[in-house]
Amino acid sequence: MAAKTPDRLIAVGVLRGAHGVRGEVRVKSLTADPEALFGYGPLTDEHGAVVLTPKSARPGKDHFIVRPKEMKQKEEWDALRGRLLHVPRARLPEAGDDEFYIEDLAGLDVFTGGDAPAGRVRSVQNFGSGDLLEVEVTGLPATVFVPFTRADVPVIDMAARRVMIPDLAVWSEPGSDDPAGDECSQ
């Protein structure tokens, strides 16, 4: 599980490869305000190494065309296609009231209605059909996936660092539908 520190890296964009032969690159933003991506400073890989420092950006069809500070050949940028671009959590604006960053759900305790936690959110995954909470259920050797919907996760209390999943037992039963395909024994 990722540590809850201000320098924890958060994915905010995806490198889509070179744009033309003048050194520009295509970047897809993963932020709520797509243009905000370029105000966070240098964009790094998952280890914190700078990949791209935007000098300017203009909108493309479903991405931005960025003039980077870094000088690379077209082939070098194309080799980075699909690379997630990150910034430290501390560079992101604070979430508003009743808002949170989905990354901040990892590590929250999971309650089903009682006073004792029934597990912990390990991560948030998306395999193409919507967000899923990956939950480490107390006493189970494998994690389970719970759809991240208001019906399945009706309460998120960031101040208390907990979520409520009343029907967690349904998702924890052997043979229950696992949206990821197989149980994940990590």
Image: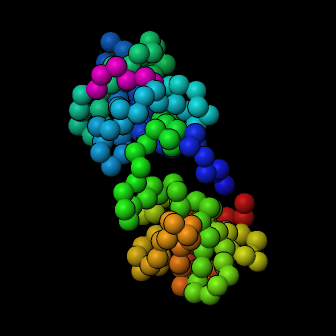
Quadrant that contains the N terminus: bottom right
Measuring from the top left, give residue 106's x and y in whole percent: 58, 59
Q: Main secondary structure of the magenta part?
A: strand
Image mark count: 0
* Residue visible at 46% across and 76% down in the picture: 155
* Residue visible at 68% across and 82% down in the picture: 116
Name, please, the residue furthest toward the bottom.
Answer: 114
Residue 53 lies within the magenta run? yes
Q: Vertical placement of 80 versus 75: above or below?
A: below
Measuring from the top left, give residue 115's x and y in whole percent: 64, 85
Measuring from the top left, give residue 64's x and y in whole percent: 29, 32
Residue 17 lies within the magenta run? no
* Residue visible at 62% across and 70% down in the picture: 109
**Within the image, what quadrant is residue 161 found in?**
bottom right
In this view, the residue in front, 10 or 134, is 10
- Can residue 181 be seen? no
Question: Which residues lie in the magenta part?
Answer: 52-57
As drawn, is 19 to the left or to the right of 103?
left
Q: Vertical placement of 2 versus 152: above or below?
A: above
* Residue visible at 45% across and 55% down in the picture: 101
- Can residue 139 be seen? yes
Measuring from the top left, give residue 159's x and y in whole percent: 51, 66
Q: Vertical placement of 126 versus 182: above or below?
A: above
Q: How is the image coloured?
A: rainbow
Quadrant that contains the C terminus: bottom right
In this view, the residue in front, 57 or 182, is 57
